[in-house]
Image (cartoon, helix red, strand yellow):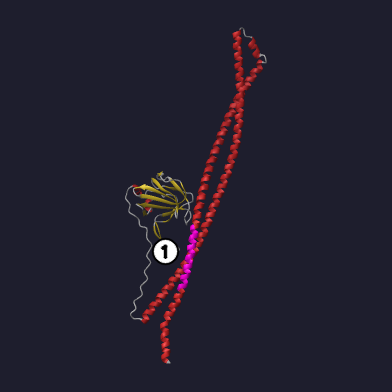
């Protein structure tokens, strides 16, 4: 009996670590299932985010079209206002001309009144010869023609004046219509911006929620995996003197760090320490490797991020030629300038683009305006300098 009891105790002792490992493994499998589900939700969220990003691109295009339409309406309004100013000048000119003609008519009427009804007849019949009579007749006809022309010109002045006043009224109506259209476009733009902001907030909140849940589950799985490894090590140590020590977990490799590339002291390379930032603002992300403030991970930046008010002008840092000016997924509206000798500069997250591919630009020329398209941190400029295709730390270039 004692032998049986001893045997049972020995078997129990041998099985205890195995049973513990089995329970832990079962728990680990459950957590792995939860992680798989969270990954599925994140994948689903990323698909939704991709879809929303596409919709945001459409919203951005719609905003750009409305902004372009607003600019065109502004030009039309300026043209109408100039037309109104010209019409006022034309009206004043015609009014003065009409007053001058009216004064001439008044003087002519006064002369006719003084001469009486028989004045011209006296001139005609006082002729001493037939040739003189013919000459006086021609003179009288000339006077009558001049009088007729004077009255006709005066009437034409009045007609033109009335037409100009009608045109002025029409232009005033057109101006009011354009003003209302501009106000309507501004409201549409604000609505589009609000819709875009709502989309972004919802998607970012959902994604952050799933990522936080996944982080917690992965931490639990890591702790449980460590416990299983300790149990297995203890079991091997207790029941086998020849067990091979457990292989230590390989430490995580750090993320790839952006490395600055040596550059020659010529062209843009000779401008180190002399340039101004492309936009007035504060540098919020610098070149190189950075630890994420919330997650135990590292990110690498090949450039710098400059926070600035939306709509701020983005300037070229140096002379060159625009080789890319379009939307690029993940970077929003982006411009790349070729400065020659292997140097390039890149400007991203713009709300609008002012230059086209092939445009020659000079230092400080306006390339675009600051926006937040595809930016996760609000309005800002993402900027890079590259030499022979490799990223270069931009900071030493600026004063």
SS at mark 1 in the image: loop
Percent position (x, y) of residue 239? 37, 82
Q: Is residue 42 left or right of residue 133?
A: left
Percent position (x, y) of residue 245? 34, 76
Q: Nearer the viewer, residue 123 or 141?
A: 141
Percent position (x, y) of residue 124? 63, 11
- Picture residue at 67% right of the left edge, 14% below the top: 118
Q: Is residue 111 left or right of residue 307?
A: right
Percent position (x, y) of residue 240? 35, 81
Q: Quadrant of the N terminus?
A: bottom left
**Is residue 33 inside the magenta stretch?**
yes
Visible residue check, residue 343: yes
Q: Nearer the viewer, residue 135 or 90?
A: 135
Q: Residue furthest right?
A: 117
In this rendering, is residue 112 above or below 383?
above
Q: Main secondary structure of the magenta part?
A: helix
In this rendering, is residue 218 above or below 10?
above
Question: Which residue is tagged 1?
Answer: 297
State which quadrant residue 133 falls in. top right
Q: Residues within 10 Å of mark 1 (few under 14, many from 20)?
A: few
Q: Which residues, given as a range, are shown in magenta? A: 28-50
């Amino acid at each position: 009996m004692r032998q049986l009891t001893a045997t049972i105790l020995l078997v129990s002792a041998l099985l205890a670590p195995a049973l513990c490992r089995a329970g832990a493994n079962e728990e680990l499998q459950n957590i792995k299932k939860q992680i798989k589900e969270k990954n599925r939700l994140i994948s689903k969220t990323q698909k939704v985010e991709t879809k929303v990003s596409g919709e945001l691109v459409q919203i951005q295009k719609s905003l750009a079209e409305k902004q372009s339409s607003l600019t065109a309406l502004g030009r039309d309004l300026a043209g109408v206002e100039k037309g109104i100013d010209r019409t006022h000048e034309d009206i004043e000119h015609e009014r003065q001309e009409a007053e001058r003609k009216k004064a001439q008519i008044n003087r002519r009427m006064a002369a006719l009144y003084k001469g009486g009804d028989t004045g011209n007849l006296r001139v005609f019949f006082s002729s001493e010869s037939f040739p003189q009579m013919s000459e006086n007749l021609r003179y009288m006809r000339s006077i009558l023609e001049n009088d007729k022309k004077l009255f006709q010109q005066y009437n034409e002045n009045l007609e033109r004046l009335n037409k100009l006043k009608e045109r002025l009224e029409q232009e005033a109506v057109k101006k009011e219509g354009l003003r209302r259209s501009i106000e309507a476009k501004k409201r549409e733009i604000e609505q589009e911006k609000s819709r875009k902001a709502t989309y972004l907030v919802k998607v970012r909140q959902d994604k952050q929620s799933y990522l936080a849940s996944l982080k917690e589950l992965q931490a639990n799985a890591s702790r449980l995996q460590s416990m299983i490894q300790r149990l297995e090590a203890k079991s091997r140590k207790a029941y086998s003197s020849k067990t091979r020590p457990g292989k230590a977990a390989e430490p995580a490799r750090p993320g790839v760090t952006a490395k600055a590339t040596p550059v020659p002291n010529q062209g843009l390379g000779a401008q180190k320490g002399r340039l101004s930032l492309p936009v007035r603002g504060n540098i919020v992300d610098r070149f190189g490797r950075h630890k994420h403030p919330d997650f135990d991970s590292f990110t690498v930046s090949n450039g710098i991020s400059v926070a600035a008010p939306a709509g701020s002008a983005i300037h070229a840092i140096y002379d060159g030629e625009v080789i890319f000016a379009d939307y690029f997924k993940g970077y929003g509206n982006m411009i790349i300038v070729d400065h020659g000798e292997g140097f390039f500069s890149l400007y991203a997250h713009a709300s609008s683009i002012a230059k086209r591919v092939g445009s020659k630009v000079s230092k400080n020329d306006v390339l675009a305006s600051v926006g937040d398209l595809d930016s996760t941190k609000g309005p800002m400029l993402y900027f890079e300098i590259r030499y022979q295709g490799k990223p270069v730390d931009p900071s030493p270039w600026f004063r």
